[in-house]
Image (cartoon, grey):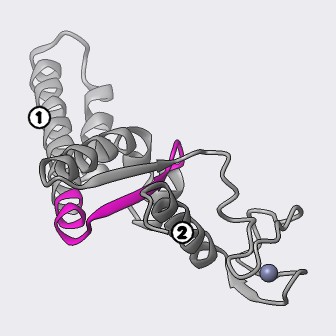
Amino acid sequence: METRLKNEQRVLSRRKKGGSNWHKQKLRVARLHEKVSNQRKDFLHKLSRQLAEAWEAVVVEDLNMKAMSQALSLGKATMDNGNGLFRTFLGYKLAERGKRLVRIDKWFPSSKRCGSCGKINKTLTLKERVWVCEGCGSIHQRDENAAGNIRVEGLSLLGLA
Ligand SMILES: [Zn+2]
């Protein structure tokens, strides 16, 4: 769809501005834009509904929807404008079912904290996908360790741990 949209936009740019073919093409681009937008919304509705039905609470890092959308492979275009929407959908769908969306502070060291002993890895960079804790020797897969920390923090905020 993104490719089709790009192609139609290229065609539009070649049309004489204000001419009847330009108007026709402009309408075609606008319709395609709407279609892409609707597909994206449908997908976000479906995904957020599945999560809201499956879980009693969903814990997210505040202002870290970028990482979340990457994890869900939503792609660049969605990252640009779908993140806030996704969180909004998820929030109200959970609320409708009497469930909770828990936000964790963006400064919470989810990646850098060792999920086993709690020691903070101050030198961890974004590139390091696997790391070894200096405190306890645990080997961590970056995202799994972070997800585990977020889970524990969320449970604590919910008063469940
Ligand atoms: Zn450790």
Horizontal relation, residue 7 to residue 43: left or right: right
**Residue type pointed to by label 1:** Arg
Question: Is the residue marked by circle 2 packed among few (<14), some (14-19), or many (20+) residues within 10 Å?
Answer: some
User: Residue 117, labelled with which disc?
Assistant: none
**Residue under the point 26% across and 65% down:** 56
Mark whose residue sits in front, 2 or 1 = 2
Q: Which of 102 and 130 is in front in this view?
A: 102
Indicate the quadrant of ligand 1 in the picture.
bottom right
Does residue 129 lie above or below 27 as drawn? below
Horizontal relation, residue 142 to residue 124: left or right: left
Q: According to the image, label 2 marks what residue?
A: 152
Does residue 102 lie above or below 129 as drawn? above
- State the image coordinates of residue 77 (x, y, percent, origin top left): 39, 46
**What's the magenta region?**
48-64
- What secondary structure is found at the residue carrying circle 2? helix
Quarter of the image where one finds residue 52: bottom left
**Residue under the point 20% across and 47% down:** 95
**Residue under the point 25% across and 13% down:** 17
- State the image coordinates of residue 60 (x, y, percent, origin top left): 45, 55
Q: Which of 106 and 157 is in front in this view?
A: 157
| Residue 107 within the magenta-colored segment of the rendering | no
- State the image coordinates of residue 103 (x, y, percent, origin top left): 46, 48
**Residue under the point 47% across and 66% down:** 71
| Mark 2 beta carbon near ligand 1 (under 8 Å) | no
Q: Is residue 97 visible?
A: yes
Quarter of the image where one finds residue 124: bottom right
| Residue 49 within the magenta-colored segment of the rendering | yes
**Residue type pointed to by label 2:** Val
Q: According to the image, label 1 marks what residue?
A: 31
Does residue 76 lie above or below 53 as drawn? above
| Mark 1 beta carbon near ligand 1 (under 8 Å) | no
